[in-house]
Amino acid sequence: MQKSLRTPRQQLLISLLVEARRARGMTQAEVALALGKPQSFVAKYENGERRIDVIEFMDIVAALDISPAAILARIEAARDSATD
């Protein structure tokens, strides 16, 4: 299993989180405030400079008020279409 910040599924995760943030009209600073983290935390995962773990993922989707299942389903669908 490839462990990279640049795998297609990792990039998809990032793009979905950025898309959700923008759809909510939130800035990186606002998400960071909701997470109790510095704005650089959000910038780094959005720029692909760091991976997020499952606990961070759950906190981020809660801050964005989106379903973790919806995000994961889109990532799984991308994986399934890549293996067809």
Image (spheres, grey):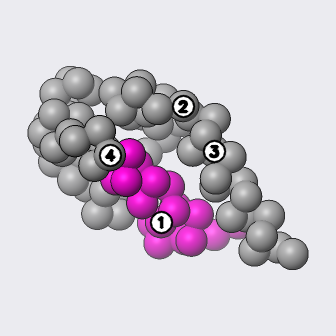
Q: Quadrant of the C terminus?
A: bottom right
Amino acid type at image mark 4: Ala
Q: Earlier in the sequence, mark 1 or mark 4?
A: 1
The reply, left or right, for residue 65 in relation to residue 13 is: left
Question: Which residue is identified by label 4?
Answer: 23
Amino acid type at image mark 2: Ser
Q: Write down the region rendered in magenta.
A: 1-20
Amino acid type at image mark 1: Gln
The reply, left or right, for residue 73 in relation to residue 65 is: right
Number of residues whose C-alpha sits closer than 10 Å to that of mark 2, classed few (under 14), some (14–19) or many (20 or more): few
Residue 41 can be seen in this image: no
Rounded to the nearest whole Å, what is the CA distance between mark 1 and mark 2?
Answer: 18 Å
Q: Is residue 22 above or below residue 79?
A: above
Assess whether residue 6 is covered by the magenta stretch: yes
Rounded to the nearest whole Å, what is the CA distance between mark 1 and mark 3?
Answer: 13 Å
Asked if disc 4 and disc 3 are in contact, CB closer than 8 Å, the reply is: no
Q: Earlier in the sequence, mark 1 or mark 3?
A: 1
Q: Earlier in the sequence, mark 4 or mark 3?
A: 4
Residue 45 rendering spot, x and y as whole percentages: 33, 53
Q: Is residue 25 above or below residue 1?
A: above
Front one among 21 and 7: 21
Asked if disc 1 and disc 4 are in contact, CB closer than 8 Å, the reply is: no
Q: Residue at x 73, y 58 (%)?
A: 77
- Give the secondary structure at mark 3: helix
